[in-house]
Image (cartoon, helix red, strand yellow):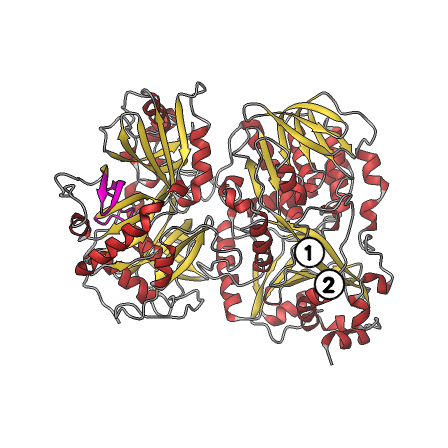
Amino acid sequence: MPLWTVFASKMRLPPLTAFRRGVDAINLPVTTSNIHNRLRSDGVRSATTDTSSSIPPQARVVVCGGGIAGISLSYHLAKAGWTDVLLLEQGKLTCGTTWHSVGLLGISHHIDFISECRSMSSQLYESIQEETGMSTGRICNGSVAVAKTKERMTLLKRSTSLMKARGEEFQMVTPSEIASLAPFIKVDDLLGGVYFPRDGRTNISDTAAALAAAAKQRGVKILEGVEVEKVLTKNNRVTGVETSRGTVNCEYFVNAAGQWGRELGLKSTPNVKIPLHPAEHYYLVTKAIEGISPSMPYVRDYDGGIYIIEWSRGLLCGGFEKMAKPIFSNGIPKPFMFETLPPDWDQFQPLLDSFLLRAPAAETAEVQQLFNGPESFTPDGNFLLGEAPEVSNYFVMTGFNSIGVSASGGVGSVLADWIISGKAPHDSLTVDIQRFTDCHNNQLFLKERVKEVVGRFYAVNYPDDDYTHARNQRCSPLYPRQQAAGAVFGELMGYERPKYFNNKDDPFFVSVKSKKTFGKPSWFDNVKAEYWSCRDSVSLMDMSTFSKFEIKSTGSEATDLLQRLCPNEMDVPVGTLVHTPMLDENGHYQNDCSVARLAENRYFIISPTTQETRAFHWISKHLPKDGSVDLHNVTHQYTGINVIGPKARELLQTLTFESLSNTDFRPFCCKEISIGYANNVKALSITHAGEPGFVLYVNNEVALPLYDRLWDAGQDFGIRNCGYYALRWLRIEKFFGYWGEDFNSSNTPFEIGRETRVKLNKESDFIGKQALIEQKGKGVESKLTMFLLEDHDLDNDLWPWGDEPIYRDGKFTGLSTSSGYAPTLGKMVVVGWVTNEDDKSGQRGIVTNDYVLKGHYEIDLAGKRFQARGSPYPVKLQLKQPQFG
């Protein structure tokens, strides 16, 4: 008998066929939530909003969106003294997706920035009660995350290692202890779990009402029933907003429109790209069950894909199904206020199965409602925050992926500071809207990707586990050759790029079926073979994904601009290649790039793949206003072929009449030459891995013929294809930190050992110079460090994958950022941070090279600490002979 038939009979419900006709079958109106009717009461609106006033002619900030995000931001702006704020809501406050939130306040998150925002939210929802005298319904009843599988326990242990380092409260619990905390769940199939005492819940209607009241008391004007029809711009800068009730001029505009965010982004010229897509989001509520108490912690059963909380003495079960159901691909219906969607019992059934397994009491309980409401999700599952790259003073705060309530309180404070100061917060790259490109805003891409994004929130996400939906969006011309050669592709910024190769015809490569693990990966021998090919002979690697820009002028303006943007000397001889950061006024990184001077007034800039939008925007905002400098994003026009290894020059010399000797073509040079039948090839004598060789940037239409010629000519040199995993091993063992991975916009060149790329004595002034002068005199308070694991069993121990706590002399000192195996050293290498924080005051002291070298280090891998040797500079390589097999 089907499970639903059994379930329905036990709960005295109509048969399955009735449920498939919709919730009307059990007298629950499709467009009304019986759970959240109180959210629609007039109390919130009459106390805080205005439904009849005309639009004011002027406001400093216009916020579009009356959900918890927009309300939080408006409150924090006013609290900081910016009281000339206008909040516009097309319907009623919270009527979009906020109103049907169950109000969970989980604090811990694997991303520090998000974890901090969640903690700030929890504190805000408590303090706002004191400020307004209005209850938010916040309770601190804790939560329990349970593990049914070994892999889940590994993930939980990794999380708790991070929490311990941060000083967060938690307790590892056994199945019997879980039963004491949450007696309504089954525990005999569990391995254990984690108890989070600081987690809690809030009543979203009361919380929103209190925040809105506090915002209004501080001067914010809130108008309902006002639709934004167009965001006005001039010279790509916000000037005002056209609405259904008139036009308001403003200095700043904030898109906090939730699931409407993408549509709103299209209502400006130029369009602002807001990559998100709505999907159905479910939870089921039972009537009262004997023994269920509001004081019980809520439960996250990640392996079952569900969470279970007390709700009016009954149970509420929600979750994240493996494959979600996208909605509204053709636009959100109008009007859409406090609306629900017809439930799809078949879609919910996997979550129902988990619910019945984990909460046996549900089998005899009566269902009050299966709720289905919309929620918006982004392509990577992180929310969208920051200034849009297309329009100045246009800020975005949306796409919260079902954590809007738990994050928005803190995010509102962060964005308010960002708007007021004009400075992005530290370490916000993972949520900054500039992490996406045009391709991510494609509607069909979003529809396909969101199916998988939802399920990943509770899935076991292994290291380097790529999305499987919405792939093959950006492919270099070399893709078909790589595919035929056995490439295993990963995806980054929409690009397909080989991670490693499976080639059954090559004795040094083993054809393997990828096995997901937190330990030694199945591709280990493949990557080791590719590594040694790069060190001993020659390999071809596709570098097309790197961001590429061209900058030129008629006079010296291009050089003057780069001298201003870069701390390194940029007025160098034509043909010179310069590695340089680009910094803000605090000396912090905004870009890390290689710049080739192709002519007196023409430069070619290469930046990391993930920084395409961000780097281009940073340079664009500093262009001369007179238009004397042209900047073009040419990423999509060029294929990058990395010819890497000691035989690279010899191979290339067979295909060109240009002398490639070390004398005529020295390292860190660039020339436009002919190779094979390809003309105007930008040949750069670097490899981004510290190995000899060249990166060739060639026009797409001749890339494939050139690759074929290189491959054919390379047969006499033992040529092989090579993927990015080998590149990672090569660069990590030489301690090459990567921007956006090992360091970010909170770090300076001195903190990561890049002093040689800063010329404090160059004639031209540069952004951030004064800050670096001061830091050089004072010393740095953190330092990027290379670690060698000393007692790590490569085959049997878990591997480091990033975000592992590092301990110096038994005290937490920083987190790892990236890692890899170093065949030349015969050890695992970890890159991470060392700080010098006083236990009592919390103040950071100076970190010198000597301080780093004298420390005794341990790195925590899921609760087990491994001895490590730390060095502020690359450990000298002692070449070992390659070992295969």
The spot of residue 431 in percent (x, y) is 53, 44
Give SS at disc 2.
loop
Residue 825 visible here: no
Q: Earlier in the sequence, mark 1 or mark 2?
A: 1
Q: Quadrant of residue 829?
A: bottom left
According to the picture, the residue beneath numbered tag 1 turns out to be 280
Classify mark 2: residues with Cα within 10 Å, few (<14), some (14-19) or many (20+).
some
Residue type at tag 1: Glu
Which residue corresponds to the image point at 26% horizontal and 72% vertical from the top-left? 885
Q: Quadrant of residue 609?
A: top left
Q: What numbered label is drawn on residue 249? A: none
Image: 219 above or below 717: above
Marks 1 and 2: CB-CB under 8 Å?
A: yes
Q: CA distance from mark 1 to mark 2?
A: 9 Å
Q: Is residue 848 left or right of residue 13?
A: left
The spot of residue 418 in percent (x, y) is 55, 32
Instruction: Please check the rendered image and state whether residue 373 is part of the magenta-colored stretch, yes or no.
Output: no
Q: Residue furthest right?
A: 27
Residue 694 or 393: which is nearer the viewer? 694
The spot of residue 358 in percent (x, y) is 67, 70
Bounds of the magenta segment: 673-692
Residue 339 or 876: which is nearer the viewer? 339
According to the picture, the residue beneath numbered tag 2 turns out to be 344
